[in-house]
Image (tube, rainbow, N blue to C red):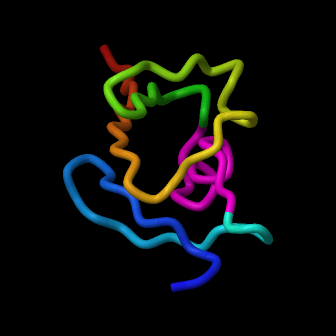
Amino acid sequence: MEGSVTLTLNGESRVLAASDGGTLSVAALLTLLGLDSRKVAVERNEEIVPRSRYAETLLASGDTLEIVHFIGGG
């Protein structure tokens, strides 16, 4: 599919729409998924992505991502 990225996200294969040029950043992915970037940690291809680099880290078809949600409570 043109204009899309195929990723493995938390063990599940997903095809996601990408912006013009077929690019999708970690920040854009989190927005698509409805996740707050302040409350998750992202690992891409077995490397932690620093939160400060979410906007500039581009994803490519075949990437494997793990996203962990932080949940507070008491």
Residue 38 appears in which quarter of the rendering? top right
Identity of the residue furthest to the right in this view = 20
Residue, x 54% and y 46% (percent of image)?
Answer: 35
Whole-percent x, y for residue 18 in the image: 65, 68
Q: Using the image as rendered, state which of residue 58 and residue 16 is in the foreground.
A: 58
Is residue 17 rendered magenta in the image? Answer: no
Residue 36 placement: quadrant? top right
Residue shown at 33%/44% (left/top)? 64
Query: In the image, residue 74 lies at what x, y percent?
Result: 30, 14
Relative vertical location of residue 55 with respect to residue 16 in this rendering, above or below: above
Q: Is residue 31 left or right of residue 70?
A: right
Considering every residue shown, the one lying at the far bottom of the view is: 1
- In the rendered structure, the answer to whether residue 56 lies left or right of residue 68 reads right
Residue depicted at 37% across the width and 37% down the height: 67
- Picture residue at 68% right of the left edge, 59% below the top: 23
Is 34 a magenta residue? Answer: yes
Taking depth in this image into account, of 73 and 14 the one nearest to the observer is 14
Front-lying residue, 24 or 27? 24
- Report the span colored magenta: 23-36
Left or right: residue 25 compared with residue 48: right
> 72 above or below 23?
above
Q: Where residue 44 sits in the image (x, y, percent)?
A: 42, 33
